Image (spheres, coloured by chain):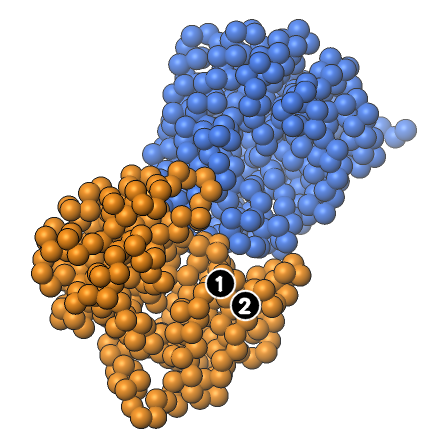
Chain colours: A orange, B blue
Amino acid sequence: MTWTRKDLLGLEELSKEEIEFILSTAESFKEVSSREIKKVPALRGKTVVNLFYEPSTRTRVSFEVAAKRLSADVINIASETSSVKKGETLIDTGKNIQALKADIIVMRHNSSGAAAMLARNLDISVVNAGDGWHEHPTQALLDIFTLKEKLGKIAGLNVSIVGDIAHSRVARSNIWGLTKLGAKVTVCAPPMLIPQAIEKMGARVAHKIETALENADAVNVLRMQFERDEDAAFPQQLEYFQAYGITQERLDRANKDILVMHPGPINRGIEMSSEVADGANSVILEQVTNGIAVRMAVLFLVAQASGKTEADAE
Amino acid sequence: MTKNAKILIKGGRIIDPANNLDDAMDILIEDSKISKVAKNITCEADKKIDAKDKIILPGIVDMHVHLREPGREDKETVASGTRAALKGGVTSLLAMPNTFPALDSPENIRILKNIVEQTAQANVLITGAITKGRLGKELSEIAKLKKEGVVAISDDGSSLESEELMLEALKIAKKENLLVIAHCEDKRLCGNGVVNSGFTSTRMGLKGISRESEYKRVKRDIDLAEHAGARIHIAHVSCAESVEIIAKAKKKGIKLTCEVTPHHFTLDEEAVLMFDTNMKMSPPLRSKDDVAALREGLADGTIDVIASDHAPHTENEKEIEFERAEFGVIGLETELALGISELVQKNVLDWPEFVRKICLNPAEILGIKKGNLKPGADADLVIVSPDKEWIVEKSGFFSRSRNCAFLGRKLKGLVEYTIYAGKIAYKLE
């Protein structure tokens, strides 16, 4: 297939074939990071702007590394240092970046739908690096890539996502992506952290961690952000760990090859014990490595697609 | 002063439910009044309009409009809003009190009355605020507002959280024979929600506005109105439960009316999934089942009125992040065409019933002598080509704002002429 989207905004809108195409493109980019000279010229002469309205280290660095390994020039803009604080609108900021002849904006924003809005208003590519509680497509793609690499397939897998589902863009993107590829997804959290009608996204709900771990091929453990939502009643940290924390004891009762994943950064002793984070089932650091390949693939594909539209116009 | 021109409109299909009239006839307008409605009128006239294949209805009475003046002239003014009204076939409208300052005192009402006198192109009626500053804390001097000529009171945009205060307001309204218009939304139940609560809020990662936040408040306000014996009108009903509660209350004999907007009877929550802020409104677009219930409510008579809830906002307030964008859409220039396209053409309402809900019922609810074409009535009428198609375009609006939920949509029904007070106030170019 050929990739035709100038933007990557979420996995909800992608077809199974499009997701598989990103994954196979990522596979071919993975090898680059193990070379002595970790660089290919695929995006030479292109400019990637990381526009981050929320503090983020790992996603931003991962995109930066990915862009640099593709030989793109990278500019980082964090909201603290930009005109955002001076009250410029998002669209104006985007148009200014476009006027600088940048090719791709990678944006993290705390407002759901911000990436979609920016993409609608710009001709250059927009890659969503997380928008509010909505989607974080590259995180889900790297999770899925890791699962596929480790287990050889996605269809038929049982994948459980544990944690604050209600406020998680990682959970949403994973549910869309995994279910499109034929996996069975279970979400597990205290009732107040399960959003309404989540079943309609194709996920099963478990309120007990034992149920979620039973028969699971992988468990994706979300970061608990106790400070996040002032409206919702949140459980106490210790209480949460006792009820939902991934401990070695709980893992011992699960499938012995169960993969333990986490989008990072981990709150050790809250979502999972240190023993589990560093244990034999953990693929957390492999996720980080795979994130580069997946983001290289995404940057490469969207750049290609917007390049094509230019060529067509000429 | 020169006498208004004598206008003879020939051969149109006249729909005037006040007179049980739906027939091809001629209309003669003299001295700003309807002078004669009959077959084959032959007489001299200053202007003759051939209305063959056209439909003639009374000027629309839109009882839910935000003109934004005074205070937010960047969004809309009385002049631009009433020009937009005429383009949409609206000759009378009820202005909501959430202006700056709010229409909560005789002085503030007089500010608006002065602007209306100087600049209005159509008939503007005024709603007074129930509470001072629309803050829900202290009642306005409602009797004095009535003396200034308000035809209704409302804190539109907000709902009174205090039951005691709402009851007190209803009692005064009863005494003053004023209509109370209730914007039913329990803020405690919808928090900072921005879209319909449920699958839509979940998949979009946004906070939801629950159905309960509307229908529980509908129930409360109807109960309070019944207790006070006051006339209450429920604004912009959006969900099935509200329709059911209203139907039950009407059956019980409570003095109660309600309205629905074209966007709520046309669009469902799926329209918002692309994060288009022109689909962000309060109440939010609900489910397909709710849209069906609203249409059923229109058909079975539970819903009395179609009103636009015309809510202009600047692009600066709309073309921003979804959560931060203002609620509301403009509607004066599209409501007639949406009614024709979505209700009449789709057999939800026949023409006379549609005209009743968009002209006659609101006039009767507001107690104004409009919405009919009886000889002697004010010559406010619309001549529309019911089958003419047009596309809603950003550049076509007379409103100062462009926040329309129907941009790019093809609609049926185009206003050819709007006659207001016996004069051609709008003519299609």
Marked residue chain, label 2: A
Query: N-terminal of the two: label 2 or label 1?
Result: 1
Q: Is residue B113 visible?
A: no
| Image side of residue A180 versus residue A6, left or right | left
Q: Is residue B229 visible?
A: yes
| Image side of residue B208 versus residue B330, left or right | left
| Residue located 61% across and 67% down the image | A82
Q: Which mark is residue A214?
A: none
Residue A46 coordinates in the image, percent (x, y): 47, 84
Secondary structure category for the residue under label 2: strand
Q: Which mark is residue A55?
A: 1
Amino acid type at circle 2 is Ala
* Disc 2: which residue: A78
**Quadrant of the snapshot with the N terminus of chain B:** top right
Closest to the observer: B308 or B75? B75
| Image side of residue B321 versus residue B238, left or right | right
Q: Are marks 2 and 1 in contact (CB under 8 Å)?
A: yes
Q: Is residue A2 above or below residue B124?
A: below
Residue A217 coordinates in the image, percent (x, y): 14, 59
